[in-house]
Image: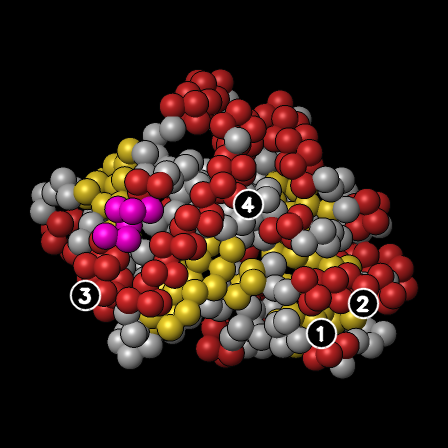
Amino acid sequence: MKTTDYIEKSENNILHTYNRYQIVLEKGEGVYLYDVEGRKYLDFAAGIAVNCLGYHHPTYTKALQEQVEKLTHISNLYYNIPMMEAGEKVLKASGMDKVFFTNSGAEAIEGALKAAKKYAFCQNGHAGCSVIAMNHSFHGRTVGALSVTGNAHYREPFEPLMGGVKFAEFNNLDSVKSLIDDSVCAIITETIQGEGGVYPASQEFLEGLRLLCDENDILLIFDEIQCGMGRTGDYFAWQGHGVKPDIMTCAKALGGGVPVGAFVLGAKAAANSLAPGDHGTTYGGNPLACAAVSAVLDIYKEEQIVAHVRELTPYLEKRLDELIQEYPCVKTRRGKGFLQGLVIEGRPVAEVINRALENGLLVISAGSDVLRLAPPLIIERQHIDEMMEKLKASLD
């Protein structure tokens, strides 16, 4: 079958909620993807920051094959070994106390919000608490996650959503302070706003949020779904700031390509929130997903993936900064580690992305004017050089 035949079949059967690029990807190897017609693409999108180990990593593949031969699902009515092992490794990497595995990032956000609300209920005995979120944030498409997503365009068609959400300005501590009252149970923010345009949180902002939460007995929730799992040169972006949340959400790269998420709680939140019967999931924490999490964290340790990101980041940033000097349409760069955004002015970002696709490079957007790069964490210098060659040809 040709590409057009596959696309026609998809449009006939799959609900059209995505305007997909006109290629059909079939397989991957290392940091490259191949479509059904054999064309090769350098991947600097990583399935939206998911495929941290690229494609067909032998240790990862072997771990999944071995688990498939043993057990893929039993439900949470029983204990399973991969969940125990994955949980232990997540807590060691994060320095937190308890973890709950979910099926996705949006579900991790839902669980984090429930934990925060239950914490407040345990403290004061009544419901109806509120949450402070950030403008231009993105936390997911489910009702709770959408309720704390700071973009009216996403929310309006589905209102009324979860009540009691107030929006502050990201990196503006005074705007958060102005919303604090006795009803607030949690503040939620991305450590780096991804979909909102690749905006890192400032040190002052994160430290200020931590202090506000401590002073008012409010839980601080960091959304690390996109920026976590080594992408910034630390296991989790907040670790680079030394500001620890009460609850953290993660997903995307957590499973290296297998769908899995988690919300992770510090001691205070873990001891005073969700109890048996408060929360659950049929698939969450299943042996196959947790074998993937365990394998990813083992590979990170054995191959020093996080240190590799730290080591290579200056070279990636240096090469990207060359574009600002060379191309008037590239106005600035922002980001951290292997999550970088280039602000494009004077031409549509979609045009650059489509040109890159024609040149065998996969990149994505963030917001209306940002070209986002979120490559597999295993890229080397030669891949950065190849990306630059292809991106310059696309900008030309």
Tell me which numbered mark, 2 or 3, is placed earlier along the sequence. 2
Q: Is residue 87 visible?
A: no
Q: Which residues, given as a range, are shown in magenta?
A: 384-389
Vertical arrangement, residue 371 with respect to residue 65, above or below: below
**Quadrant occupied by the C terminus:** bottom left
Q: Give yes or no for residue 346 being in the magenta stretch.
A: no
Residue matched to label 2: 212
User: Element at badge 2?
Assistant: helix
Identify which amino acid the numbered label 3 is placed on: Asp
Residue matched to label 1: 173
**Distance from label 4 to label 3 (Cα)?**
31 Å
Tell me which numbered mark, 4 or 3, is placed earlier along the sequence. 4
Q: Quadrant of residue 301?
A: top right
Tell me which numbered mark, 3 or 1, is placed earlier along the sequence. 1
Depth order, front residue of 247/337: 337
Question: Neighbour class for label 1 at 10 Å: few (<14), some, many (≥20)?
Answer: some
Tell me which numbered mark, 2 or 1, is placed earlier along the sequence. 1
> Would residue 157 be found to the left or right of residue 186 on screen?
left
Identify which amino acid the numbered label 1 is placed on: Leu
Residue matched to label 4: 233
User: Element at badge 3?
Assistant: loop
**Distance from label 3 to label 1 (Cα)?**
41 Å
Q: Are marks 2 and 1 in contact (CB under 8 Å)?
A: yes
- Numbered mark located on residue 281 in the image: none
Q: Are marks 3 and 1 in contact (CB under 8 Å)?
A: no
Tell me which numbered mark, 2 or 4, is placed earlier along the sequence. 2
Residue at horizontal 47 percent and vertical 64 percent from the top:
334
Identify which amino acid the numbered label 2 is placed on: Leu
Residue matched to label 3: 396
Q: Are marks 4 and 1 in contact (CB under 8 Å)?
A: no
The mark closer to the camera, 4 or 1, is: 4
Q: Position of residue 348 (x, y in %)?
A: 28, 74
